[in-house]
Image (tube, rainbow, N blue to C red):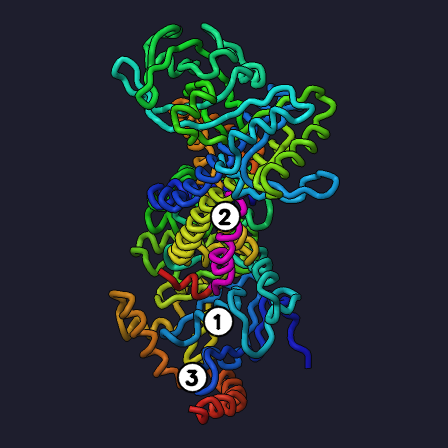
Amino acid sequence: MFGGNVKMALMALRTSKGRSLLTMFGVIIGIVSVVTTVSLGEGIKQQIVGQINRLGSDLITVRPGDIITRDLKGNITKINAINGFGFSSGSLSQSDLTTIQTTPGVQEAVPISLVSGSVRANGVEYSNDTIIGTNQDLPDIIKQNLAFGAFFSKAEARQQVVVIGQNVATQLFGEQAPIGMTLTIRGQDFVVRGVFNRFTTSPLPLGPDFNNSIFIPYQTALADTNANSQLVQVLVKPNNPNATNATIASLNSRLFAAHGQQNDFTVLKQDENLAVTNDILNLFTAFVAGIGAISLLVGGIGIVNIMLVAVTERTREIGIRKAVGATNRQILGQFLIEATVLSLVGGIIGIVLSFVIEILIRLLSDMQPVITWQIVLLATGVALIVGIIFGITPAIKAARKDPIDALRYE
Amino acid sequence: MKATPKRQPVITLKDVSKLYGFGGATTLALDEINLEIEPGEFMAVMGPSGSGKSTLMNIIGLLDRPTHGTYTLGNRAVARLRPNQRAKARRDRIGFIFQSFSLLPRLNVLENVALPLAYKGVPLTRRLKRAGIMLEQVGLSDREYFMPRQLSGGQIQRVAIARALINDPSIIIADEPTGNLDSSNSRVVMELLSEVHKSGNTILLVTHNPELTRYANRVVYMHDGSIVHDERTPIGEVPRLARRAMDLFPRKTEEDDLAGVSALMRTIPDKPAGLKKRRKAKRRKPATKKQTARSKH
């Protein structure tokens, strides 16, 4: 009987293709938006995990703003996701960098600061740019080698030199190794010293794509921007990988003192960094997926509507079925299965479309969405549940029809 | 004084009444009907519109429940069954043939015939095989995979007969099965029903066409919710009363049939004496009920 009902349901879908498709649109859009959002979040998470593995677990990150709350033992008790969303800035200054660099246990401290401004070369403007002020230890701390040339040295800390990502090289100069060529940042000429190898993932959680970035010495950035360059992160490598916690403790106390007893900065281990980023991503994903869920709700209402119409249209059929011995439960089952099949077919179309969209996103942007089997299973389950929840009312209406009235209906 | 040994009736209705609505708007559709139908009877039910024929058939067919009275189908009291039990009893004991639109338009002929078996839980291949056999019996085995819209009216009714027979029911209820058919198709359908009857089935036929009573061995006339005349007649003959309707209004259309039956009911006083007495006795009781219903008006 179940198989027969499914067959009948598919037949009903086929006989009114246009109407079924319109009804399914709500479900399709809902499933596509939920799957795409979750897959984007999943993709970013996987990138971050890859990044943590690359950078090593002993890396310490100092970020502006109060992102987390710790208990006395140093465990995170609360994540202030809003503060941690993207790069907060403003509360880390040049003097903080010096404080960090002079803290005992710190081997290297690499500033990441953002410089605003346009980049030009040979009259071509590069629009996709991120200009990062940093120091000579960056390649070491993010474990990335250069493809051509060399990174600027400590001696060049105040010079107009630049290292670029591969996309910048090809798009601005039209070649892979534009060593010695000149580009202009904020009206100043910079000489290209090196080109990074291609970054497979961004080294910073939620950070810019380093393939599109231009790296200049931090001191130069300060000089060029009248010390307005924003310090968004400091990457710290401790002397002893086993003493990470001790180093964090001393960083915390020294910065706390330097900031006039204000907790407006955050020192994080790599795994904590991951936790913070995951938390932020989950919040973001849940928010956008929630919007997708609204379209699922609308899709569900469409199903109720069309099934109510179907029940009325097929009153005579219900009458005949009851006359030949269908019980109320069998009629209920038939219409419930029909609504569920409608929703499920919509869900499957939605999942297929999501795969197409995933490929398009990968081709057309730098994002790497990942559709896992869990997401597919979740989407299928959601479509199934939508069908059952929204199909039950029309199915009950069909089941309760009086056989005599139904047989009289024409 | 013991009656001559009688076959156990397949249907026994005792004081069955059906009221619709409540309060001042109460309508009495059936008025204490007493009826016994023996296995193998071919009973035609005649009467003008609103006389309660359909209500009676709905109750016998377990589509409806009587307001009062008892209904025994076989050995089982079925008047008070719950809807699901009624559906199952209907499935196993009763076959319906309706006047029109009796097939599901989206199923093919074979699937339509097999439908009652599906609700019984018979596996697909078995039920299709059985449906094939039934179609062969009604002479439509070459139409198995046709859709209902590809069939003529007569063929549709023959498919409906095959479907009604598939569960091997105790009773077949045919509600104006030839109402939408021309005379030659009507004859084919009636001959088929007649064959079904000959093989031992009980058939209840609702009709306006006095000519069709020829196939029945019992004719019941209804008026205002009561059985006003009950007549046994040899198969092949149109009973006296029905013939009178035919003479009064020679058949042209269905309306003429209706008018004929209505006119017939006005002439009913010359009904058999025995029946008259029974009716009088019966009338006394429901009269009080009717009066109460009317006094509420």
Task: Name the quadrant of the N terminus of chain B.
Answer: bottom right
Q: What amino acid does circle 1 point to?
A: Leu
**As drawn, B51 above or below A370:** below
**Is B170 situated left or right of A407 in this image?**
right
Q: Identify the residue shown where x is 57% and y is 26%.
A: A98
Location of residue A220 (image quadrant) = top left
Residue B223 image position (x, y, % from top left): 41, 79
Total marks shown come to 3
Range covered by the magenta-colored residues: A379-403
| Residues indicated by labels 1 and 3 sit on the same polypeptide chain | yes
Is the residue marked by circle 1 packed among few (<14), some (14-19), or many (20+) residues within 10 Å? many
Q: CA distance from mark 3 to mark 2?
A: 42 Å
Mark number, residue A387: 2
Q: Is A177 on the left or on the right of A204, as rendered?
A: left
Q: Is residue A4 visible?
A: no
Main SS category, magenta section? helix
**In the image, which disc is placed on residue B25?**
3
For numbered disc 2, what is the local secondary structure?
helix
Tag 3: amino acid = Ala
**Vertical arrangement, residue B255 with respect to residue B34, above or below:** above
**Quadrant in which the C terminus of chain B appears:** bottom left
Residue A391 image offset from top left, x and y in percent: 49, 52
Q: Nearer the viewer, mark 1 or mark 3?
A: 3
Q: Chain of mark 2?
A: A
Mark 1–mark 3 distance (CA, rounded to whole Å): 20 Å
Q: Which residue is mark 1?
A: B56
Which residue is the extreme one toward the bottom?
A: B295
Q: Chain of mark 3?
A: B
Residue located at (36% from left, 24% from top): A128
Going by the numbered disc 2, the residue's amino acid type is Gly
